[in-house]
Amino acid sequence: MGVTRDGFIILIPLCIATILAIALAFGLNRWWWLAASPLIILLLFSLWFFRDPERTIPGSDETVVSPGDGKVLQVVDLESDEFIGGKAQMVSIFLSVFNVHVNRNPVSGIVRDVKRFPGKFLIAYDHRATNENNRLRVDIESPRGRVRCVQVTGAIARRIVCHLSIGDSIVRGNRYGMIRFGSRMDLVIPASAKVQVKPGDIVHGGETVIAIW
């Protein structure tokens, strides 16, 4: 299991600080391990948090896969969505600090829009977060239909990472970004797609089939 590159900005300084703390504490007393333990624990947690396991992408392009790991909060019908172009469905996924936070493309296709929205930092499982929190929206046009994927920050998460740009050609299941330390993913798909999950289900990014075209 590897570590996502998006965590290096935190892991490298933390690793350096931990090494310096161990060296300093070791030179001062025999209880060096106790003095340096807070940084050691923080480093181990950060390494675990930024883990990036390989995933086996199931099925074919007839399926929409989960953009993230976590628990399905809700599956709701939407009267309309401007990008989808009519009735749609939204699947919301809550990512706790214990989940893998690497986000993956739900479908293959072309990125039509990438837009950031400044906002609040409500707890991610609060449904108001969908429209009120700081978030980043990616609109994807696939051969089978349009999909909107929204990364939403939470009360702890303050940083959204997205490596996609307008016009990019993307592959279903490939990595595209992450949200640091607890968050929410909202996936909007056409009403005609057959959703395969329900509230309470545990899903895994790139592996769990969310819907079938």
Image (cartoon, helix red, strand yellow):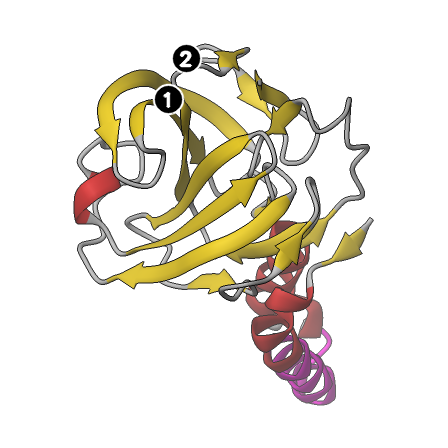
When asked about the image quadrant of residue 86, the answer is top left
Which residue is rendered at x = 41% and y = 13% of the image? 199
Q: Do the residues bearing badges 2 and 1 touch, measured as CB atoms within 8 Å?
A: yes
| SS at badge 2 | loop
Q: Amino acid at mark 2?
A: Pro
Report which residue position mark 1 lands on: 73
Query: Dot 1: few (<14), some (14–19), or many (≥20) neighbours within 10 Å?
Result: many
Is 140 covered by the magenta stretch?
no
Q: How many numbered badges does the structure rendering display?
A: 2
Answer with left or right where residue 44 lies relative to residue 112.
Answer: right
Residue 199's label in the rendered image is 2
When asked about the image quadrant of residue 157, the answer is bottom left
Front in this rendered view, residue 46 or 100: 100
- Of the 4 image quadrants, the one containing the C terminus is top right
| SS at badge 1 | strand
* In the image, residue 170 above or below residue 193: below
Q: Amino acid at mark 1?
A: Leu
- Residue range (magenta): 14-30
* In the image, residue 162 above or below residue 59: below
Which residue is rendered at x = 77% and y = 32% of the image? 57
Front in this rendered view, residue 111 or 211: 111
Query: Dot 2: few (<14), some (14–19), or many (≥20) neighbours within 10 Å?
Result: some
* In the image, residue 105 above or below residue 170: above
Is 24 covered by the magenta stretch?
yes
Answer with left or right where residue 59 lies relative to residue 75.
Answer: right
Residue 7's label in the rendered image is none
Residue 49 in percent (x, y) is at: 60, 51
